[in-house]
Image: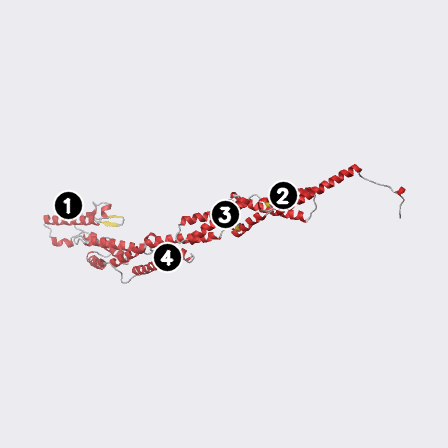
Amino acid sequence: MECEPEKLILRYRYTLDELATMIAGVKKRAESYELWVDKVKAALEAKNDDRLEFSELKSMLEEAQTSKYPETELFEALTLTVEEADKCQQVANQLGNKKVRTRTRGVADSKYRLTVEELQLFATQLETLPAVVTGHEAVTQLLEQVEKFQAKAEKLINAKKVDADEISKCIEVGCSLDVDLGELDQLKAKLKQIEWLEEAKEILDDPLSGSFESIKEVLDAGMELGPHPEVEKALGEISGLLQQVENWEERAKACLAAKPRLTLNEVDKLIKDGEQISDGLPTLATLKDTARKAKEWIVKSHELTKHPDNFPYIDILETLVARGRALPVKLDALANLETQVAQGRAWRERTARVFLKKNSNLSLLDILCPRYDIGGSESKKKRKPKVEDGTIQHPIFQNLSQKELLDPKAIVKAFKDAETKELQVRVLSGISLSTKSFSCPLRG
C-alpha cells in the first residue's frame, strides 16, 4: 500500500555535518586497515635483511587486536607467525645464555639437550622466520662452535697417536656446548683406551710396580674396552703375565705343603722367581717370612752347637726343635738336634730314677749340685734350700739376681764355681773324691 508523501515522516540521528565527519572517519579507518594489510603482507613475505624485528611484527598484531580488525586469513597468519617467533626467541635466548648452560649441564639433563640435527634445523628455522628474533646470533655462534668441535673430534678419533690431555680438553669443550654430540662417546672411549694402554705399559715394563690385584683390575678393565689392535696385544701380554703369576702361586703353595720338604736353596730360588714377576704376589710374603725364619733357625742352631764344651739347656733345644718342625723347609741340623733332645730326655729320666726318691720335692738340678757344707762348721749344721714362688732354689744360686737366674750362662758359672770350691775343700780337708757322688745332702 502506497503512502502519500504528505503523510511520510523522516527520522534522522545525525546531522549532515555529523554524517560528513562519520564518512571521513570510516574512510580513514578503511585506509588504515588497508595500510596495515600492506605492511603485514610485506612483513610476512620479507626475507634475509628485509625482515623486521620481532618487536615490530608483534606491534602489528597488537594494533590489529586494539583496532579490532577483522579476523581474516592474514590476521590468523600473523598470529601464528608471532607465536612461532616468540617460542623460537625463548629457545634461542636459552641456548645463548651461558649461565643457563652451566646450570643445566650434566648427565641428568643430557636428555633435554638438542641434537646437532635439531640445532641445524632450528638455525635454519630462525633464518626463514619472517622476523629477526633476539638470540639468533648466539645460536649461529653455537652452531659454528659445534661444527668446529666436530672437525677437531673427528681428527682426534682418526689419529693413530694422540695425547690424552688433548682429548680431555676436547671432551671438556664438547660438554660445555650443551648439545648432544655423538663424538663425545667416541672421544671418551678413545681416552679410556689411551689411559688403559699407559697403565698396561707401566705394568709390562715393570711388573714389580703393581700388586697382583692391581694387575687383575687392569686386565678386567681392558676386557671392557672396545676392540683395538694395541689393546688386544696388551691384553695378551698381561694375560701371559697373570699366567706366570698363577703358575708361581701353585708352585709356592706346593712348596709350603711339600712332603718331603724342600731345601732352603730351593725356597730361595722360588722366591727369586716370584720377585722377578711381582712383589705383590699373594704367597710371596709368606714364603719370604718362612725363609727368614729358617735362616734365623739355622743361625741359632749353629750358635748353640758350635761350642761342644758349653751345651745348651735341654728346654732350649726342645724349643728350637719345635720351631724347626713347624717350618715347611728341610733343615739339615734338625735331625741331629732331635737326637740330642731324645738322648737328653733319656739321660734325665735314668738319672732321676737313680738319684730322686718318689714324691720328692727336690729337682734333679738340686740333687746334682756340688756340696756346700763340707770342710767347715757348715757341715755340722745343714741348711735347707729356700722355696720361692713354688720352686726350690739351691744355696749355691742364692747370690744370683732374678735376672741372672734366667740366664743359663750365669747358672752354669755358679755351678762350676761351686764344683771347683767343693774340690778345693776336699783336697784341703783330705776328703776322698770318690764319695762325691753319694755325699750330696740334697739327694731325693
Q: Label 3 vs label 2: CA separation?
A: 29 Å
Cβ atoms under marks 2 and 1 closer than 8 Å = no
Instruction: Name which of mark 2 and mark 1 comes first in the sequence.
Output: 2
Q: Give the mark nearer the N terminus: 1 vs 3.
A: 3
Question: Which-is-in-front pick, marks 4 and 2?
Answer: 2
Q: Residues within 10 Å of mark 1 (few under 14, many from 20)?
A: few
The residue indicated by pointer 2 is 58
Q: Is residue 173 visible?
A: yes
Of the image marks 3 and 4, the number of the one nearer the N terminus: 3
* Distance between mark 2 and mark 1 Cα atoms: 138 Å
Q: Residue at x 78, y 39 (%)?
A: 19
Give the structural element (helix, strand or loop) at label 2.
helix
- Which residue has dot 1 on it? 377
Query: Disc 4 on helix, strand or loop?
Result: helix
* Circle 1 or circle 3, nearest the eye: 3
Residue 138: % across, % down: 53, 44
Image check: 212 left or right of 87? left
Mark 4: amino acid = Ala
Q: Earlier in the sequence, mark 4 or mark 2?
A: 2
Disc tally is 4
Tag in front: 2 or 1 = 2
Compare residues 96 and 387 and report the one nearer the observer: 96
Q: Residue at x 51, y 46 (%)?
A: 142
**Residue 387 image offset from top left, x and y in percent:** 25, 48
Numbered badge on residue 144: 3
Q: Residue 234: which disc? A: 4
Query: Which amino acid does the dot numbered 2 rest on?
Result: Lys
Q: Earlier in the sequence, mark 3 or mark 2?
A: 2
